[in-house]
């Protein structure tokens, strides 16, 4: 009963957040002075009548949010926008002259591919380092690990990427851009994926280092807290070795804050993906945003922002649900 | 505060690093060998010229001295970092105090708003807003400041919540003190130190945001920041020209100030809100004294 209430509440808040994102997204792209026909209106061949026809064609003569002038209340620009979204219509890219939804769909998988590897590696390494660091707290290892984590956290992702790109391409002969070697004939899928793997190596290392620091620091302080609980003393008094206590008693409880952090960190992950993809020309959503900014391709920018924001909100919801399974106490909270 | 800073070596290092950066920013016109504003006559040899006696850090894509641009760039990073964090501190502090101290419906609504802003990914939103309103220095400061307050708000709210139930506050209330008086005289002074520590940490986030925006081409076109230098170098062939000097210094500058603020902020936070320092698994593996111990003591 209580868990069901918790799930309903969390889902409701996620939906509200998505609604907020929709409204924000709608208004952000309308704060430009004038409407899209103003720029066309500079063309001397365009009569006022054509302009009005254009406005009518794109629904720009309608009220912005709610129609209070009679007729249906929902006959407004905002609801037209929501209706188009419901049909996965995100508009046409200025630059590619293709539907934005198609473009995003092509790029999404590549971003997921990039983000997954880095996330998994950084979680495993960060949790491991944090655990050892807390266990050996106040030793040289601990101080070294903290310093490394703080330094890794302070690195601008894009800059680390550039440095690794230069080092990796000059000393290891790794590819510098893209997803596959251009103009390559593959002997089979194995050959192709090996090539993709080579392209993925540097972006993944960049991603891992940048994310690693925060996971390590959170895990460390979480383990420190657990290790000063009385039940740890009991476990030790039973004669268990340190490793048994760490593995059997401390790890699972200490992981809870890390799960929350992974969810909250998704925004940070997205920011990392934009930078890493830009540096390595990885054909994902991030480099698409970079190109859209440079070419003022607003429909693409709007669509990409919407997709990213909604994904992050949904991922947070999933993390909340996982958390409620891991920690039965949240029911009462 | 200073005593604690002295006890923590990392904090001292951070304060020293931040001090150096502030000096470089303040005295930039005297420290920089060349004036970045000056128009220069550029020949093909001046573009991405290697470090030499004339240009200690070489030249960039426009034939300008990298070292001078680097020293002047510190001004933008620090200005954006400090101003944006001040904005964040004011918004976050106000939201947190109201939500924690007054609570009720307004407090609840404020925390919901905080949660919403916490979930929406910052960088894409910043990119969209700056792309729409135009990349001027003040727009960037405002956008970073207005989007960076959620952490502060949550921290201040938690503090205010616990403080308002403390004995001295209840006593002041019993003596007839009003809400505003309690907030101003009893809650705020106790929350302030943590807010300052938090703000120092927010500075490092703001500086990272600014450099990322500038790197993505959304920096103020009239003032060159470290992120902007990296944007020019990256988009104008420094990598294929193997011109590492144009790429290394600005990046190290960012790491320098971000790390400095992180170290100082962490040390301050530790001082105002001490955490656990020891635990049960420190020292020997077994709890029983080993025979060698007993023998040594006996």
Image: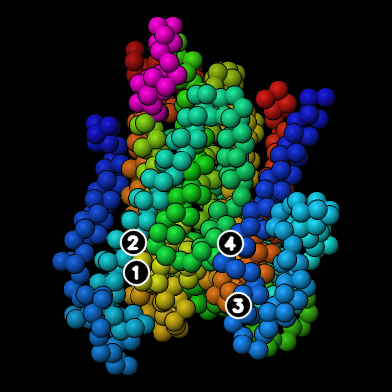
| A161 is higher (above) or lower (below) than B1 | below
Marks 3 and 1, how far apart at CA: 29 Å
Q: On the image, numbered disc 1 is attached to which residue?
A: B223
Q: On the image, numbered disc 3 is attached to which residue?
A: A39
- Crowd band around label 4 with a 10 angstrom C-alpha radius: few (<14), some (14–19), many (20+): few
- Crowd band around label 2 with a 10 angstrom C-alpha radius: few (<14), some (14–19), many (20+): many
User: In the rendered image, is residue A7 in sight?
Assistant: yes
- Crowd band around label 1 with a 10 angstrom C-alpha radius: few (<14), some (14–19), many (20+): some
Q: Quadrant of the C terminus of chain A?
A: top right
Q: Name the chain letter of the residue that bears numbered label 2.
A: B
| A124 is higher (above) or lower (below) than B161 | below
Give the image quarter of residue A117.
bottom right
* Residue drawn at the location 76% of the way across and 71% of the way down: A56
Q: Name the chain letter of the residue that bears numbered label 4.
A: A
Q: Are marks 2 and 1 in contact (CB under 8 Å)?
A: yes
Q: Are marks 3 and 2 in contact (CB under 8 Å)?
A: no
Q: Name the chain letter of the residue that bears numbered label 3.
A: A
Q: Are marks 4 and 2 in contact (CB under 8 Å)?
A: no
Q: Are marks 1 and 4 in contact (CB under 8 Å)?
A: no
- Image coordinates for residue A175, horizontal then vertical, percent: 57, 78
- Image coordinates for residue A32, horizontal then vertical, percent: 57, 66
Q: Quadrant of the N terminus of chain A?
A: top right
* Residue drawn at the location 62% of the way across and 43% of the way down: B116
| Element on which disc 2 rests | helix
Residue B185 inside the magenta-drawn segment: yes
Marks 3 and 4, how far apart at CA: 14 Å
Q: On the image, numbered disc 4 is attached to which residue?
A: A31
Indicate which disc residue B76 carries.
Answer: 2
All told, the count of numbered labels is 4
């Amino acid at each position: 009963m209580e868990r069901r209430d918790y799930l309903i509440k969390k889902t409701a808040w996620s939906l509200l957040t998505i609604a907020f994102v929709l409204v924000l997204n709608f208004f952000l792209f309308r704060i430009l002075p004038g409407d899209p026909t103003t720029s066309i209106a500079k063309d001397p061949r365009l009569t006022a009548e054509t302009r009005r026809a254009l406005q009518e064609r794109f629904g720009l003569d309608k009220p912005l949010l709610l129609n209070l002038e009679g007729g249906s209340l929902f006959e407004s620009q905002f609801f037209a926008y929501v209706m188009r979204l419901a049909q996965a219509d995100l508009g046409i890219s200025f630059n590619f002259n293709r539907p934005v939804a198609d473009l995003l769909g092509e790029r999404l998988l590549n971003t997921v591919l990039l983000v997954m590897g880095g996330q998994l590696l950084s979680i495993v390494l960060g949790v491991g380092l944090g655990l050892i660091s807390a266990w050996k707290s106040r030793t040289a290892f601990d101080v070294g690990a903290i310093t490394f984590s703080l330094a890794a956290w302070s690195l601008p992702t894009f800059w680390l990427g550039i440095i690794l790109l230069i080092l990796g391409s000059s000393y290891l002969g790794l590819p510098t851009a893209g997803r596959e070697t251009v103009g390559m004939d593959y002997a089979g899928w194995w050959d192709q994926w090996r090539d993709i793997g080579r392209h993925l190596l540097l972006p993944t290392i960049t991603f891992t280092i940048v994310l690693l620091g925060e996971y390590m620091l959170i895990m460390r302080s979480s383990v420190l807290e657990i290790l000063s609980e009385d039940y740890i003393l009991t476990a030790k008094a039973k004669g268990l070795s340190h490793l048994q206590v760490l593995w059997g008693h401390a790890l699972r409880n200490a992981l809870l804050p890390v799960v929350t952090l992974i969810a909250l960190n998704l925004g940070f992950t997205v920011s990392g993906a934009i930078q890493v993809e830009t540096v390595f020309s990885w054909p994902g959503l991030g480099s698409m945003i970079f190109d859209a900014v440079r070419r003022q391709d607003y429909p693409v920018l709007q669509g990409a922002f919407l997709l990213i924001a909604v994904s992050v909100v949904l991922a947070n919801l999933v993390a909340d649900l996982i958390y409620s399974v891991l920690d039965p106490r949240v029911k009462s909270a | 505060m200073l005593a604690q800073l002295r006890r923590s070596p990392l904090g001292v290092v951070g304060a020293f690093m931040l001090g150096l950066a502030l000096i470089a920013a303040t005295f930039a016109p005297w420290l920089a060998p060349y004036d970045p504003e000056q128009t220069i006559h550029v020949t093909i040899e001046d573009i991405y010229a290697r470090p030499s006696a004339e240009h200690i850090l070489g030249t960039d894509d426009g034939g300008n001295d990298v070292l001078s641009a680097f020293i002047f760039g510190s001004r933008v990073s620090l200005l954006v970092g400090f101003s944006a964090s001040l904005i964040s501190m004011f918004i976050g502090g106000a939201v947190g105090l109201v939500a924690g101290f007054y609570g009720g419906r307004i407090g609840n609504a404020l925390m919901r708003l905080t949660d919403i802003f916490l979930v929406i990914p910052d960088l894409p939103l910043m990119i969209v807003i700056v792309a729409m309103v135009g990349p001027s220095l003040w727009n960037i400061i405002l956008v970073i400041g207005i989007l960076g307050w959620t952490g502060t708000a949550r921290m201040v709210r938690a503090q205010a919540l616990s403080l308002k139930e403390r004995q001295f506050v209840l006593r002041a209330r019993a003596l007839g003190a009003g809400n505003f008086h309690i907030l101003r005289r009893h809650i705020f002074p106790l929350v302030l130190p943590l807010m300052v520590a938090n703000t120092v940490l927010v500075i490092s986030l703001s500086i990272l945001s600014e450099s990322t925006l500038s790197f993505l081409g959304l920096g103020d076109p009239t003032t060159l920041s470290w992120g902007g230098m990296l944007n020019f170098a990256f988009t104008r062939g420094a990598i294929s020209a193997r011109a590492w000097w144009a790429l290394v210094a600005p990046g190290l500058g960012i790491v320098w100030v971000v790390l400095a603020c992180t170290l100082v902020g962490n040390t301050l936070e530790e001082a105002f809100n001490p955490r656990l320092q020891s635990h049960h698994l420190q020292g020997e593996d077994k709890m029983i004294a080993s025979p060698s111990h007993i023998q040594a003591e006996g």
